[in-house]
Image (cartoon, coloured by chain):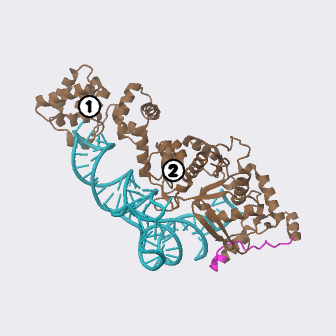
Chain colours: A brown, B cyan
RNA sequence: GGCCCUAUCGUCUAACGGUUUAGGACGCGGCCCUCUCAAGGCCGAAAUACGGGUUCGAUCCCCGUUAGGGCUACCA
């Protein structure tokens, strides 16, 4: 493919990495890697008011965690830096001045108060709100006079009064917007910082970005950006506007209706592979019936042509299923490592379990788990003796004769030497036979005595994991407590 | 309000005018398996928003309606 593919992810550091942002970053990354291009990270911090301490570091570490590695960006110079907009202010100012000289932009001295009034008037008259171009035709002398008087001002772009602009979007096809509905957008704010519109165009050009792949919320302002490219006499990049990620009620995915930060999902125990896989499928699919994709496979298969146009609801159920699938497929050694980490932050942190034991717990519990924490929560009895017995199970499974039967069973178990699953099973069957009861009459009370709960892995598997002595001990413990 | 975008099962989606009784996945229901809970296997319910065109033939193309969303800042 083209060797000069360069794309970028350009978040503003206002907090955490949004899952929609991760999807945008991922699609850019996949597109770049698929085509042998470069993926650039650029920080759009031109709004001082929204600046959040530590947000950039957090953004980068989350992106790295997900495996979406950028080739160029803050801390990873690539010859097009700096990659932080607040460090490029002179560049924007020069370009804005250039536009003024060419007659494509002008100084505006209107106060926020006046703009507010204009807007209020327009609203009252039920007109669409836009700047009334009050300063568009100020004389050079007046501009000079007010400038030297130190009046605060902004620089606005001079949008043609009539005509329309048509452009092609890789995902949406042809889009047309009339200049009439475009505002004379502010490009340099009175604090000297550029607005998004100027900065994005200048940087995308200077950083040789070939494809602008971003969220659909930017579609309406794309004509302004294209106009700026034309004002500067620059070649246009290709545009691709991604469908939005939605809340269950179909509004734009937002806080308030659940978690939106990638960190939140990470903290909840979702694997990065599951999150990446899931997010990739929100708006893209391979065209066949495969569902499980590694990052490498996504790189191999991804194409913008297969990105859909309509918004996608973030469906946690399916993410859960994916997490479950990834846990099921994970190499045992990796599960072991993760289980140790999980235990280290659990109430069992002080206890020590050897690898062989933990591995047997993993084998027993894996297909019943979606998250690593399920091992600790659902399999608590593998890490501590039961300190209580589920009252409902007790009511259903513990009969008056159970205590006596478990005593016999315990005695039978004590006669076993290093029993395997089969020996435990045979011992139970023989005991049931001699007591003239069904196997299940022993199985259920025994499960309750040993685990404290009514569900879980096969009983004999549990017995083997715990071992004869522990099983006998727990039976005696239960007999005492359930007298 | 204005502008723009979108519209297939509840959700994610396949179908790029005919091979379709519209396919898959999650979720949901049932059955099997079974010591429980899962897993697994099998089966099932479930969609082309509506109305006009174009065409021999429309989920697919065009127009309109409706619905939803986005944008409409000296925020990104």
Which mark, by number, is residue A101? none
Residue A353 visible somewhere in the drawing: no
* Closest to the observer, A238 or A148: A238
Q: State whether the magenta stretch is mostly helix, strand or loop.
A: loop
Q: Is residue B55 above or below residue A37?
A: below
Which chain does the residue under circle 1 lie in?
A
What range is drawn magenta here?
Answer: A122-139
Quadrant for the C terminus of chain A, please. top left
Q: Secondary structure beneath disc 2? A: helix
Asked if the residue under mark 1 is in contact with the one under mark 2, i.e. CB atoms within 8 Å, the reply is no
Element under label 1? helix
**Residue A19 x %, y %:** 54, 51
What residue appears at the point 42 percent right and 34 percent down from the top-left corner?
A347
Q: Which mark is residue A460?
A: 1
The first of marks 2 and 1 along the sequence is 2
Q: Is residue A362 left or right of residue B65?
A: left
Q: Quadrant of residue A385?
A: top left
How many dots with numbers?
2
- Packing grade of label 2 (10 A; few <14, some 14-19, many >=20) is many
In this view, the mark in front (2 or 1): 2
Left or right of A463, for residue A197: right
Chain designation of label 2: A
Nearer to me, A96 or A478: A96
Q: CA distance from mark 2 to mark 1?
A: 41 Å
Q: Does the magenta-highlighted stretch encompass residue A310?
A: no
Q: Position of residue B59 (x, y in %)?
A: 44, 67
Residue labelled with disc 2: A280
For residue A147, which quarter of the picture?
bottom right
Image x and y of residue A400, in percent: 15, 37
């Amino acid at each position: 493919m083209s060797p000069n593919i360069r794309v970028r992810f350009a978040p503003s550091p206002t907090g955490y990495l949004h899952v929609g942002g991760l999807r945008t970053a991922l699609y850019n990354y996949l597109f770049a890697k698929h085509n042998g291009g470069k993926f650039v990270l650029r920080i759009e911090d031109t709004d001082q008011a929204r600046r959040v301490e530590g947000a950039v570091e957090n953004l980068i570490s989350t992106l790295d965690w997900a495996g979406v590695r950028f080739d160029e960006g803050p801390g990873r110079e690539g010859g097009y830096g700096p990659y932080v907009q607040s460090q490029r202010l002179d560049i924007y100012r020069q370009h804005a001045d250039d536009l003024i000289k060419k007659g494509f932009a002008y100084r505006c001295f209107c106060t926020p108060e006046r703009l507010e009034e204009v807007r209020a008037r327009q609203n009252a008259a039920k007109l669409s709100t836009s700047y009334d171009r009050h300063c568009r035709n100020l004389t050079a002398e007046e501009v000079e006079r007010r400038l030297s008087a130190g009046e605060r001002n902004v620089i606005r772009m001079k949008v043609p009064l009539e005509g329309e602009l048509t452009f092609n979007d890789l995902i949406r096809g042809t889009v047309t917007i009339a200049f009439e509905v475009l505002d004379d957008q502010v490009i340099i704010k009175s604090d000297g910082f550029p607005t998004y519109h100027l900065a994005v165009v200048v940087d995308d050009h200077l950083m040789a970005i070939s494809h602008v792949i971003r969220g659909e919320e930017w579609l309406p302002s794309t004509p302004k950006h294209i106009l700026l490219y034309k004002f500067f006499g620059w070649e246009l990049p290709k545009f691709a506007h991604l469908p939005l990620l939605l809340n269950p009620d179909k509004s734009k995915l937002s806080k308030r209706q659940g978690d939106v930060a990638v960190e939140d999902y990470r903290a909840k125990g979702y694997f990065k592979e599951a999150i990446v896989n899931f997010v990739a499928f929100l708006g893209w699919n391979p065209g066949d019936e495969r569902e499980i994709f590694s990052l490498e496979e996504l790189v191999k298969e991804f194409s913008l042509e297969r990105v859909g146009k309509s918004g996608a609801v973030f469906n946690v159920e399916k993410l859960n299923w994916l997490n479950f699938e990834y846990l099921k497929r994970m190499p045992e050694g990796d599960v072991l490592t993760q289980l140790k980490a999980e235990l280290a932050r659990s109430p069992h942190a002080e206890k020590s379990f050897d690898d062989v034991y933990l591995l047997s717990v993993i084998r027993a519990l894996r297909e019943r788990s979606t998250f690593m924490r399920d091992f600790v929560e659902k399999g608590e009895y593998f890490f501590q003796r039961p300190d209580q017995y589920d009252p409902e199970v007790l009511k259903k499974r513990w009969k008056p004769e159970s205590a006596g039967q478990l005593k016999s069973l315990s005695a039978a178990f004590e006669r076993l030497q290093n029993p395997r699953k089969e020996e435990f099973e045979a011992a139970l069957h023989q005991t049931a036979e001699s007591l003239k009861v069904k196997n299940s009459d022993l199985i259920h009370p025994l499960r309750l005595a040993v685990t404290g709960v009514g569900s879980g892995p096969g009983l004999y598997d549990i017995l083997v994991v715990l071992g004869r002595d522990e099983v006998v001990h727990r039976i005696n413990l239960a007999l005492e407590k359930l007298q």
